[in-house]
C-alpha cells in the first residue's frame, strides 16, 4: 500500500486546517448573515457557539483521525466499529455534495476577479446574467476545480500544506490592507458601529440557529474533513492547542472580514441586509466609485482574497473523498484526485445550470407545505450543509461519548498534550460531548429539517 502523507510541521497543519475553515463561509456568508441578524448580536452568538459546541467536536474529529490514520470511513472501521462506518461514508458523500456547488460559487469569485481586473465594474448589475452564462461560469468553475485538484494531487505536505502556508498569510495581508483602506472611506465608522454595537432585539430564534449552523459549517465540522486532516498529524502534536488555534483563526478571520466589509457597504449608504448578493451585486459598484485605477486594485484584491479563501476550503473538501478513494480502494493519489475531481465537477453541472440557465434545474422542486420552487443548488445545499453536517456532528458526538468512550478519546488527546489530564478542558470536553453537543446538534438537525423541508417553524 502507498505510504500515507504527513504534515511536516505544526504550523503547516494548523494553516491547512484553518485554511479549510476559512472560506466563502467567512468572507461571503458571514458578513451577510451578520447584516441580516442584527450586526454585532449575531457576531457575539457566533463566537460563543464556536467555543461551546464546535471546539469539542473539532477536538474529537482530530482525535479520531490521528488515532486511526484513516479517512472518515476507514477510521470507524479501524476503531473496530464497522457498523458506525456509515457515519464516515455520510461524511464522504456530504463532502462530494458540498464541493459540487461550493465550486460553482468559487468560480463566481474567480470570475469576478478576472472581470474586475479587466475593468468591468458593471459586473455587479450583470450578476443574474453572469451566473446564467454557463460557458463562462462553467469555465471559471473548471479552472477552479483544476487548481484544487492540482494542489491535492501533490499530496499532503508538498500540496495541501505548502499551498496553505503561502495562501493564508497572503489572505491576511490582503484583508488587513483592505481594512486600512476601507476605514478611510466616508461613513466607515457607521459601518463599524453597526458591526460592533449589538442590537439584541434583532435576535430571533431563527437568528440563533442560523448562528449555530453557521459556526458549525464555518469550522468545517460534521463531515470528517478534520478526521482526514487529523490523520496526517504526528503523535507528538498537541491536538488541544491546535484545535484552539484553528478555532481562533477561523473566528479571527471572520471577524476581520466584517471589519473590512461594513465600511465598504456603509460608504455607499447600502443596506447591510442585502443577503447573498451583498458581495456580488453591491460591492463592484463600491469599487467603481473609488476611481478606475484604485477600483481595479482594491476590487481585484478583494476578489482574489475571496478566491484564495475558497481554494483552501475546496482543497479540504476534495481531500476527503480522495483520501477515501486512496485508502479504501487502493487507487494512487494522483489518479484518484483527478478522477474524483472530474466526477464532482460533473455532479455540480445541474447546480451550475440552476441559476437561471435551465428552467428545469432553476425551479427544481417544491418541498412539502410550500409552493415556492427551489433550485437544484439550494436543494443540494439544504441536504448537505443544513442537514447532513449537523447530523454527522450529532452522530459523531454520540459515537465518541457512548460507543468509543471517553477513556479512549482521552488517551489519544493526552498524547502530545501532557497537561490535558485533569484539566478543565478535559472535563469540559467530556460534558460537551456527552450532553451539550448531542442535545443542541439534535435540536438543530430537527429544527432545520422541519423548517427547510416542511416549512414548519417551531418558533
Ligand atoms: N468552512 C468552509 C467555509 O467556511 C466550508 C467547508 C465546510 C469546508 C466543510 C470544508 C468542509 O467556507
Image (tube, rainbow, N blue to C red):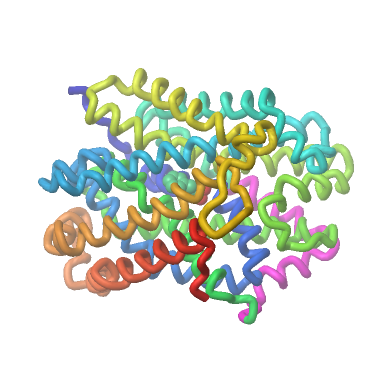
For this view, does 33 lie left or right of residue 270?
Answer: left
Q: Residue at point 45% right, 66% down? A: 447
In the foreground, 313 or 83:
83
Picture quadrant where residue 406 is located: bottom left
Residue at image coords 63%, 42%: 363
Instruction: Where is residue 45? Give x, y as percent.
Output: 51, 71
**13 and 215: which one is in front?**
215
Residue 151 position by quadrant: top left
Q: Is residue 128 left or right of residue 44?
A: right
* As drawn, 435 above or below 69: below
Range of residues picked out in magenta: 172-200
Image position of 16 with respect to 243: above or below: above
411 or 279, which is in the foreground?
279
Judge left or right: residue 416 versus residue 244: left
Residue 278, x across and y down, in percent = 72, 53
Q: Main secondary structure of the magenta part?
A: helix
Where is residue 176? Give x, y as percent: 65, 52
Amino acid at each position: 500500500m502507498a505510504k500515507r502523507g504527513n504534515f511536516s510541521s505544526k504550523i503547516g497543519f494548523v494553516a491547512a486546517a484553518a485554511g479549510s475553515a476559512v472560506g466563502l463561509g467567512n468572507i461571503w456568508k458571514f458578513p451577510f448573515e451578520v447584516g441580516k441578524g442584527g450586526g454585532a448580536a449575531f457576531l457575539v452568538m457566533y463566537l460563543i457557539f464556536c467555543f461551546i459546541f464546535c471546539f469539542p467536536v473539532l477536538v474529537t474529529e482530530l482525535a479520531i483521525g490521528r488515532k486511526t490514520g484513516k479517512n472518515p470511513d476507514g477510521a470507524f472501521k479501524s476503531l473496530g466499529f464497522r457498523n458506525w462506518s456509515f457515519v464516515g461514508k455520510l461524511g464522504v458523500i456530504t463532502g462530494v455534495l458540498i464541493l459540487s456547488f461550493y465550486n460553482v460559487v468559487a468560480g463566481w469569485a474567480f470570475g469576478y476577479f478576472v472581470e474586475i481586473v479587466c475593468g468591468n465594474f458593471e459586473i455587479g448589475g450583470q450578476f443574474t446574467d453572469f451566473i446564467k452564462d454557463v460557458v463562462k461560469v462553467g469555465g471559471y468553475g473548471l479552472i477552479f476545480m483544476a487548481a484544487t485538484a492540482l494542489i491535492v494531487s501533490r499530496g499532503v505536505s508538498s500540496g495541501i500544506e505548502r499551498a496553505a502556508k503561502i495562501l493564508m498569510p497572503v489572505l491576511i495581508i490582503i484583508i488587513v490592507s483592505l481594512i486600512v483602506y476601507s476605514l478611510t472611506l466616508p461613513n466607515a465608522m457607521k459601518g463599524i458601529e453597526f458591526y460592533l454595537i449589538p442590537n439584541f432585539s434583532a435576535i430571533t430564534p431563527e437568528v440563533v440557529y442560523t448562528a449555530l449552523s453557521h459556526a458549525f459549517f464555518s469550522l468545517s465540522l460534521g463531515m470528517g474533513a478534520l478526521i482526514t486532516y487529523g490523520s496526517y498529524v504526528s503523535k507528538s502534536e498537541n491536538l488541544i492547542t491546535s484545535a484552539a488555534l484553528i478555532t481562533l483563526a477561523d473566528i479571527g478571520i471572520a471577524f476581520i472580514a466584517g471589519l473590512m466589509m461594513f465600511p465598504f457597504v456603509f460608504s455607499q449608504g447600502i443596506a447591510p441586509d442585502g443577503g447573498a448578493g451583498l458581495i456580488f451585486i453591491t460591492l463592484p459598484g463600491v469599487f467603481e466609485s473609488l476611481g478606475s485605477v484604485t477600483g481595479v486594485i482594491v476590487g481585484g484584491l478583494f476578489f482574489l482574497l475571496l478566491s484564495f479563501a475558497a481554494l483552501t476550503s475546496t482543497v479540504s473538501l476534495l481531500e476527503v473523498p480522495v483520501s477515501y478513494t486512496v485508502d479504501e480502494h487502493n487507487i494512487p493519489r494522483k489518479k484518484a484526485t483527478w478522477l474524483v475531481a472530474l466526477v464532482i465537477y460533473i455532479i455540480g453541472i445541474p447546480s451550475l445550470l440552476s441559476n437561471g440557465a435551465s428552467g428545469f434545474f432553476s425551479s427544481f422542486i417544491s418541498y412539502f407545505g410550500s409552493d415556492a420552487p427551489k433550485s437544484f443548488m439550494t436543494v443540494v445545499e439544504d441536504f448537505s450543509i443544513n442537514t447532513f453536517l449537523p447530523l454527522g456532528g450529532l452522530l459523531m458526538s454520540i459515537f465518541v461519548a457512548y460507543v468509543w468512550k471517553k477513556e479512549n478519546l482521552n488517551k489519544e488527546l493526552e498524547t502530545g498534550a501532557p497537561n490535558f489530564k485533569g484539566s478543565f478542558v478535559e472535563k469540559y470536553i467530556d460534558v460537551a460531548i456527552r450532553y451539550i453537543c448531542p442535545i443542541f446538534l439534535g435540536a438543530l438537525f430537527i429544527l432545520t429539517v422541519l423548517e427547510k423541508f416542511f416549512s414548519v417553524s417551531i418558533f
